[in-house]
Image (cartoon, rainbow, N blue to C red):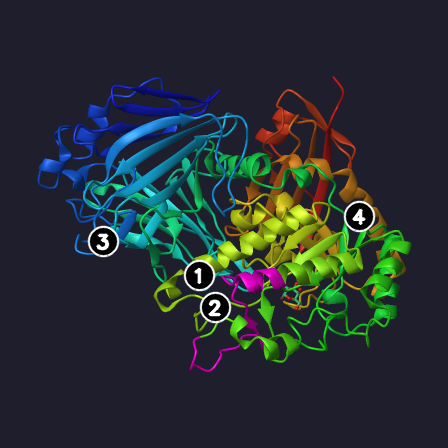
């Protein structure tokens, strides 16, 4: 059970596993004392003196006092020489707010956040702390939630202009965390198109380090996440601290090391390209950030994130629901299809046991390639003479659900929409539009664009009767300007864009609660916790190569759950890498996420089609364990030739284990892989070999994994606990 203890100027939030402790200093500064395993109590003196202050008195009146104080929501310019979490300009009053504690209240229920996705749940406790600046009237309302079941603290800030003059907010981070030392490695996830979220780990050094984006999305290149791990921290053991932002736009995630080796972590909307006008009485709500603490290494941290998202963020309706095994037409047909071809692919897919057929890009306007028609969301009657309804009906008549692709935030210059509303695209008047993939981005800050997008999507869903929507987004911002926003609010566009997107998504999921939405952004270019509030799954990467996917899925799983990672078996040679991996290995890797296909089943041999039937039956049988089980990463593709992971059901009676070997090796004995997460007291039968082992043996000695010769070979084992 979570509790909030308030005594002697200390504010202590804790549940069964963690504590988060703050102190109100005599001068009113809000100090940060501790985040880590649950404590019964703390001596503030110890923490504060070790921070180098030498005195726990009135920090404000001492030279350099604030500079040494670990703080909750610091502001630079009043003695703290480090970079703060908040900056605003107050006409005639400088740009620093002297934030002092003005009150704290425990809330009965966790409030939602205005216009933003946020965690929810009836358990746990929320504390609201108000800091106020007497000179400017600015107030910062800090919200802290701890749920009963999670080693996490959820934070956000509401900045209120309580003064009588307009303010210009130029930085409002969602969280800041001052840590007493810098003996940490920083872990971030970075990449590019088709190789998203590779893991980078390096020691912290004095100065700033971190990741950020300015492209209008959380991006292919970076993820709104960072972790700190002790040098000795492994997948299974040691301290790890993860931070993630529930946001899909420009963000900054930073770890800065200052004097005395203290570390300041911050996470929030990227202050570059951000200036927000706050009239008197107005408020700005930051996105929510989550801090997770683990003593069970990076694996423990990841599982804590996964469970938190699943219990408190993902659309509840989909968390435990069966996700249909889908076949997507993209790599099967690209733009080259018509109704008959799609129906014949779907027929073949249905025979293999596929449950949902998705028509990808190419069905609307005159979209024979990627150069036209985004925005003209009427079916291309040359390809689909009977329109969406007839195609949908024919697919459903095969016993399949029908799904459809859209890229609603975009417009092609070659479209009726653009000709009618050139001002609806993001642009700077007088500058030539910069297209990417021949397209422009609609200005989602505009209410008329939001209305158009909502109508386009809802009409498409209604007309087609689709049970599934793939919501794509395939380009980044450039020429960032809005014909709708006034000149002094142009820098609000990146954040207002995301608010507009969220508003439309919110309306859609309410209007079509039964439609399963999968997010996509040139693959995993906006795969973040913000999107997961609306869509329970996201196309993890356009790279469907089994070996590349091992790396991408490993990195992604650091903070995002396998149940949300769209992952498909595709054809060989692989369309991105040209590699030919065996069908079993493509299957084993795709099972590591939300499972489906991305190929033309008509082109498979009879033997392969039979294999598909077996695969789909297996995927369905093991879905619960794979989606709801705990993920244990065993062998890292970043460290060697083998990748291995296991997912263990919550009651430890079932597990699915996968090993993939990248390069075949001659004259090499089979690996003995130590498993994790099993019950050491139980005995497990490996269904594929029919051998029985003790859980202790499997975890301490290991499971032998004989591999066939050749590259990209794999083993997939299903473990079932024997009845006692
Ligand atoms: C993006 C997506 C692909 C596919 C294409 C269609 O690249 O990531 O899966 O939908 O768009 O144009």
Label 1's element? Answer: helix
Residue 615 numbered tag:
4
- Which of disc 2 and disc 1 is earlier in sequence? 2
Q: Taking the image as four quarters, which one is ligand 1 found in?
A: bottom right
In-image side of 426 versus 517 (left or right): left
Q: CA distance from mark 3 to mark 2?
A: 30 Å
Q: CA distance from mark 3 to mark 4?
A: 63 Å
What x and y, as percent, mark residue 159? 34, 45
Q: Between 303 and 612, which is closer to the camera in this rendering?
A: 303
Please tell me whether residue 629 belongs to the stretch shown in magenta: no
Q: Are marks 3 and 2 in contact (CB under 8 Å)?
A: no
Q: Is residue 690 above or below residue 200?
A: above
Residue 90 numbered tag:
3
- Residue at the (25%, 50%) spot, across then down: 83
Residue carrying label 1? 494
Which span of residues is magenta-colored? Answer: 428-452
- Which of disc 4 and disc 2 is earlier in sequence? 2
- Badge 2 density bin: few <14, some 14–19, many ≥20, Cα 10 Å: some
- Residue at the (24%, 43%) spot, across then down: 137
Q: Are marks 1 and 2 in contact (CB under 8 Å)?
A: yes
- Which of disc 2 and disc 3 is earlier in sequence? 3
- Which of disc 3 and disc 1 is earlier in sequence? 3
Ligand 1 within 8 Å, label 1 CB: no
What x and y, as percent, mark residue 212? 40, 57
């Amino acid at each position: 059970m979570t509790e909030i203890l308030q005594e002697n100027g200390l504010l202590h939030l804790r549940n069964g596993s963690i504590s988060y402790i703050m102190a109100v200093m005599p001068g009113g500064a809000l100090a940060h004392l501790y985040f880590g395993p649950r404590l019964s109590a703390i001596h503030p003196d110890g923490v504060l003196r070790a921070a180098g202050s030498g005195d726990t008195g009135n920090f404000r009146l001492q030279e350099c006092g604030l500079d040494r104080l670990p703080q909750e929501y610091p502001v630079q310019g009043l003695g703290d020489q480090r970079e703060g979490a908040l900056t605003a300009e107050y006409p005639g009053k400088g740009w620093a707010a002297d934030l002092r504690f003005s009150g704290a209240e425990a809330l009965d229920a966790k409030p939602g956040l205005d216009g933003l996705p946020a965690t929810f749940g009836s358990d746990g406790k929320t504390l609201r702390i108000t800091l106020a600046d007497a000179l400017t009237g600015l107030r910062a309302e800090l919200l802290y939630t701890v749920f009963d079941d999670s080693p996490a603290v959820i934070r956000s800030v509401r900045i209120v202009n309580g003064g009588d003059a307009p303010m210009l907010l130029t930085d409002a981070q969602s969280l800041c965390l001052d840590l007493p030392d810098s003996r940490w490695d920083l872990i971030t996830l970075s990449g590019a198109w088709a190789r998203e979220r590779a893991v980078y780990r390096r020691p912290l050094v004095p100065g700033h380090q971190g990741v950020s984006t300015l492209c209008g999305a959380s991006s292919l290149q970076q993820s709104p996440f960072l972790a700190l791990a002790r040098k000795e921290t492994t997948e299974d053991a040691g301290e790890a601290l993860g931070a993630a932002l529930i946001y899909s736009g420009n963000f900054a995630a930073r770890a800065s090391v200052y004097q005395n080796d203290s570390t300041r972590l911050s996470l929030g909307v990227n202050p570059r390209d951000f200036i927000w006008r706050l009239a008197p009485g107005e408020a700005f709500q930051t996105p929510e950030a989550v801090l997770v603490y683990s003593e069970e290494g990076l694996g423990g941290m990841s599982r804590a994130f996964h469970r938190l998202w699943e219990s408190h963020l993902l659309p509840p309706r989909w968390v435990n629901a069966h996700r249909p095994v889908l076949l997507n037409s993209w790599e099967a047909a690209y733009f080259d299809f018509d109704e008959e071809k799609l129906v014949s692919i779907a027929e073949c897919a249905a025979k293999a046991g596929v449950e949902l057929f998705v028509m990808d890009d190419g069905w609307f306007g005159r979209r024979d390639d990627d150069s036209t028609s985004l925005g003209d969301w009427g079916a291309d009657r040359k390809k689909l003479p009977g329109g969406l309804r007839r195609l949908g009906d024919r697919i459903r008549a095969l016993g399949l659900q029908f799904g459809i692709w859209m890229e609603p935030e975009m417009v092609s210059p070659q479209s009726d929409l653009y000709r009618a509303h050139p001002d609806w695209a993001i642009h700077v008047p007088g500058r030539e539009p910069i297209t990417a993939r021949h397209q422009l981005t609609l200005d989602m800050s505009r209410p008329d664009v939001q209305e158009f997008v909502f109508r386009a999507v809802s009409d498409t869903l209604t007309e087609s009767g689709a049970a599934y929507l793939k919501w794509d987004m395939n380009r980044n911002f450039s020429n960032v300007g809005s014909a709708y926003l006034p000149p002094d609010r142009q820098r609000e566009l990146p954040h207002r864009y995301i608010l507009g997107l969220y508003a439309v998504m919110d309306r859609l999921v309410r209007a079509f609660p039964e439609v399963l939405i999968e997010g996509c952004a040139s693959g995993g270019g906006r795969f973040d916790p913000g999107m997961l509030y609306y869509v329970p799954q996201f196309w993890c990467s356009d790279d469907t190569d089994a070996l590349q996917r091992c790396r991408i899925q490993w990195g992604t799983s650091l903070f995002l759950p396998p149940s949300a990672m769209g992952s498909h078996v595709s054809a060989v040679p692989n369309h991105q890498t040209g590699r030919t991996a065996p069908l079993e290995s493509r299957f084993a890797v795709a099972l590591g996420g939300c499972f489906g296909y991305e190929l033309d089943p008509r082109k498979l041999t009879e033997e392969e089609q039979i294999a598909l039937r077996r695969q789909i039956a297996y995927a369905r049988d093991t879905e619960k364990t794979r989606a709801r089980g705990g993920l244990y990463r065993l062998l890292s593709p970043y460290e060697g030739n083998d990748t291995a992971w296991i997912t263990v059901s919550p009651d430890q009676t079932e597990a699915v284990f996968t090993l993939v070997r990248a390069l075949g090796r001659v004259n090499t004995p089979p690996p003995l892989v130590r498993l994790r997460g099993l019950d050491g007291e139980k005995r497990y039968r490996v269904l594929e070999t029919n051998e029985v082992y003790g859980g202790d043996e499997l975890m301490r000695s290991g499971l032998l994994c004989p591999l066939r010769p050749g590259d990209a070979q794999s083993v997939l084992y299903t473990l079932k606990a024997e009845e006692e």
